[in-house]
Image (tube, rainbow, N blue to C red):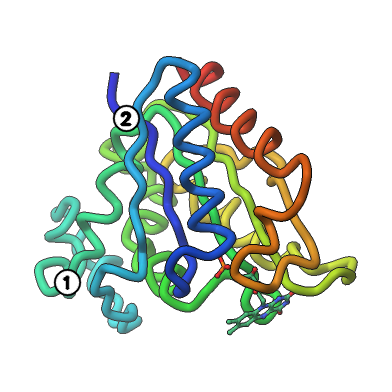
C-alpha cells in the first residue's frame, strides 16, 4: 500500500503545525502504515495565471494540462493526491484562511477542477478516500476562525475524490511551542493519524 501524505503548510519551520505533522505521522505508523511529510514552504509554486489553458486543452493530461506544469514543482506536490490512501493537512490559520503558499498550490489545482467538472475519467475514476486536517490558530476566540480554511480544503480535495472529515482545531496557539504545552494535544493528534490510516486501509 502507498504511504499516507501529510502536508505541512506553515511558512514557519518547527512551529506548532510542523509538530502536528510529526504527530500525525507517528499515528499513521502506530496503525501500521507509513507517511510522507511534505513541507509546502520548501517547494517553488508559481501562482495560477488564470489563462484558461486547462479549460481549452481537454486532450491533455496531468502536467501537460497546465501552461506552468513543467515550470515549477506544483505537479510533484499533487502526485500523492492520486496515489495516497489518505491525505492529511497540518496548517496554521493566516488571516482567517490557509497560508498563501498552500493557497497558491490550491489555485493551481484548477486543472483538476476543470477535468472533474467535465467528468474526465482520469480524475473521475480516482478511488474515493478521506482527507483530514489539523488547523491551528493564534486567536483564542472567533466563531468563524476556521471556516474559510475548512470550506477551501473541502472543495480542493473534492477534485481528487477525497472527502474532508471534520478538522481537529486548536485555538490560542501563537508562539512556536504553544501547542506542545497543551496537555492532551499529543494524544488527540496521534489518534487522528492512527484513525486516518485505520479507516483508509
Ligand atoms: C501572516 C499570519 C497571519 C495570521 N493570521 C491569523 C489569524 O487570522 N487568526 C489567528 O487566530 N491567528 C493568525 N495567525 C497566527 C497563527 O495562526 C499561529 O501563530 C499559529 O500557531 C502558527 O502556526 P505554526 O507555528 O505552525 O507556524 C497568523 C500568523 C501569521 C504569520
Label whose residue precedes the other's in the sequence (2 or 1): 2
- Where residue 25 sits in the image (x, y, percent)? 45, 36
Answer above or below: position of 131 versus 115: above
Residue 48 position by quadrant? bottom left
Q: Which residue is pictured at 35% across the width and 70% down the height? A: 41
Q: Is residue 7 visible?
A: yes
Return the residue at label 2: 3
Q: Taking the image as four quarters, which one is ligand 1 found in?
A: bottom right
- Report whether 135 appears left or right of 145: left
Return the residue at label 1: 72
* Helix, strand or loop at mark 2: loop
Pick the residue in front: 136 or 126.
136
Observer-side mark, 2 or 1, equals 2
Q: Quadrant of the N terminus?
A: top left
Answer above or below: position of 4 versus 90: above
Pick the residue in front: 137 or 48.
137
- Where residue 72 sits in the image (x, y, percent)? 17, 71
- Where residue 100 sits in the image (x, y, percent)? 48, 78
Characterize the local packing of mark 2: few (<14), some (14-19) or many (20 or more) Cα atoms within 10 angstroms. Answer: some
Gap between marks 2 and 1, in whole Å? 23 Å
Q: Quadrant of the C terminus?
A: top left
Answer above or below: position of 97 versus 181: below
* Helix, strand or loop at mark 1: loop
Q: Is residue 126 visible?
A: no
- Report whether 47 appears left or right of 169: left
- Report whether 116 appears left or right of 67: right
Amino acid at each position: 500500500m502507498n504511504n499516507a501524505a501529510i502536508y505541512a503548510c506553515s511558512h514557519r519551520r518547527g512551529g506548532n503545525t510542523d509538530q502536528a505533522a510529526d504527530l500525525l505521522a507517528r499515528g499513521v505508523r502506530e496503525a501500521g502504515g507509513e507517511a510522507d511529510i511534505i513541507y509546502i514552504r520548501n517547494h517553488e509554486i508559481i501562482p495560477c495565471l488564470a489563462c484558461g489553458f486547462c479549460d481549452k486543452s481537454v486532450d491533455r493530461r496531468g502536467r501537460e494540462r497546465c501552461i506552468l506544469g513543467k515550470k515549477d514543482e506544483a505537479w510533484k506536490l499533487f502526485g500523492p493526491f492520486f496515489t495516497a490512501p489518505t491525505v492529511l493537512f497540518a496548517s496554521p490559520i493566516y488571516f482567517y484562511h490557509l497560508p498563501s503558499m498552500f493557497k497558491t498550490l490550491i489555485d493551481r489545482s484548477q486543472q483538476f477542477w476543470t477535468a472533474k467538472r467535465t467528468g474526465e475519467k482520469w480524475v473521475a475514476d480516482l478511488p474515493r478516500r478521506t482527507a483530514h486536517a489539523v488547523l491551528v490558530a493564534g486567536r483564542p476566540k472567533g466563531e468563524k476562525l476556521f471556516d474559510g480554511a475548512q470550506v477551501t480544503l473541502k472543495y480542493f480535495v473534492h477534485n481528487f475524490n477525497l472527502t474532508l472529515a471534520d478538522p481537529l482545531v486548536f485555538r490560542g496557539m501563537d508562539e512556536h511551542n504553544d501547542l506542545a504545552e497543551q496537555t492532551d494535544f499529543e494524544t488527540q493528534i496521534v489518534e487522528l493519524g492512527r484513525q486516518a490510516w485505520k479507516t483508509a486501509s
